[in-house]
């Protein structure tokens, strides 16, 4: 007959523990930046490269997609500083990529902007 499975709940694990346990992730990190990331970075006046290096304590290569630049152009003059930042030559440009899909992939950490600094978002429980 049917046996009911008990669900167990675990507390949130520190993000540093995740990077230690996942041996596939290592520097230099390639970080895909989206429109909201640039908008919040400009609002909080954070230097992208230095902020990412301070967070991850390693060399980072920011990657900007063409769709991110197109979306910033479409948003108009209010986001022109974010657009100029996205077009910076320090950032590598790539083809179109579905960023919304990365949130569903286990093992992919996400970086958020908040309170004047970058932070690693809560990782999916599947990945931990």
Image (cartoon, rainbow, N blue to C red):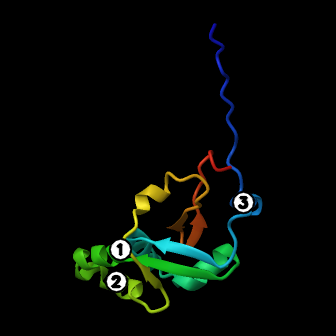
- Graded by Cα atoms within 10 Å as few (under 14), some (14 to 19) or many (20 or more), the crowding at tag 1 reads many
**What's the CA distance linking mark 3 and mark 1?**
28 Å
| 75 relative to 99 in the view: left or right | left
Res. 49 image quadrant: bottom right
Name the secondary structure under disc 3: loop
Res. 25 image quadrant: bottom right
- Graded by Cα atoms within 10 Å as few (under 14), some (14 to 19) or many (20 or more), the crowding at tag 3 reads few
Q: According to the image, label 3 marks what residue?
A: 22
Q: Nearer the viewer, mark 3 or mark 2?
A: 3
Q: Who's the residue at 70% across and 72% down the image? A: 26
Return the x and y of residue 47 as percentages of the image width and height.
53, 85
Name the secondary structure under disc 1: helix
Q: Who's the residue at 46% across and 73% down the image? A: 33
Return the x and y of residue 123 as percentages of the image width and height.
61, 53
Return the x and y of residue 128 as percentages of the image width and height.
68, 49
Q: Disc 3 vs disc 1: Cβ atoms closer than 8 Å?
A: no
Q: Which mark is first along the chain, 1 or 2?
A: 1
Q: Is residue 65 above or below residue 3?
A: below
Q: Who's the residue at 66% across and 21% down the image? A: 5
**What's the CA distance linking mark 3 and mark 2?**
34 Å
Q: Which mark is first along the chain, 1 or 3?
A: 3
**What's the CA distance linking mark 2 and mark 1?**
9 Å
Q: Disc 3 vs disc 2: Cβ atoms closer than 8 Å?
A: no
| 54 relative to 47 in the view: left or right | right
Q: Which mark is first along the chain, 2 or 3?
A: 3
Q: Nearer the viewer, residue 68 or 13?
A: 68
Numbered badge on residue 83: 2
Q: Nearer the viewer, residue 123 or 119?
A: 123
Which quarter of the rendered picture does the N terminus lie within?
Answer: top right
Q: According to the image, label 1 marks what residue?
A: 68
Q: Is residue 21 above or below residue 11?
A: below
């Amino acid at each position: 007959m049917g046996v009911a499975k008990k669900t167990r709940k675990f507390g949130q694990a520190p993000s540093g523990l995740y990077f230690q346990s996942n041996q596939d992730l290592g520097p230099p990190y390639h970080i895909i930046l989206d429109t909201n990331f640039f908008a919040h970075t400009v609002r909080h006046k954070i230097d992208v490269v230095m902020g990412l290096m301070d967070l991850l304590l390693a060399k980072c290569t920011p990657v900007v997609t063409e769709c991110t630049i197109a979306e910033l152009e479409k948003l108009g003059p209010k986001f022109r500083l974010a657009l100029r930042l996205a077009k910076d030559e320090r950032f590598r440009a790539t083809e179109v990529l579905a960023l919304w899909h990365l949130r569903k992939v286990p093992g992919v950490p996400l970086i958020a902007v908040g309170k004047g600094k970058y932070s690693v978002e809560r990782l999916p429980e599947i990945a931990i």
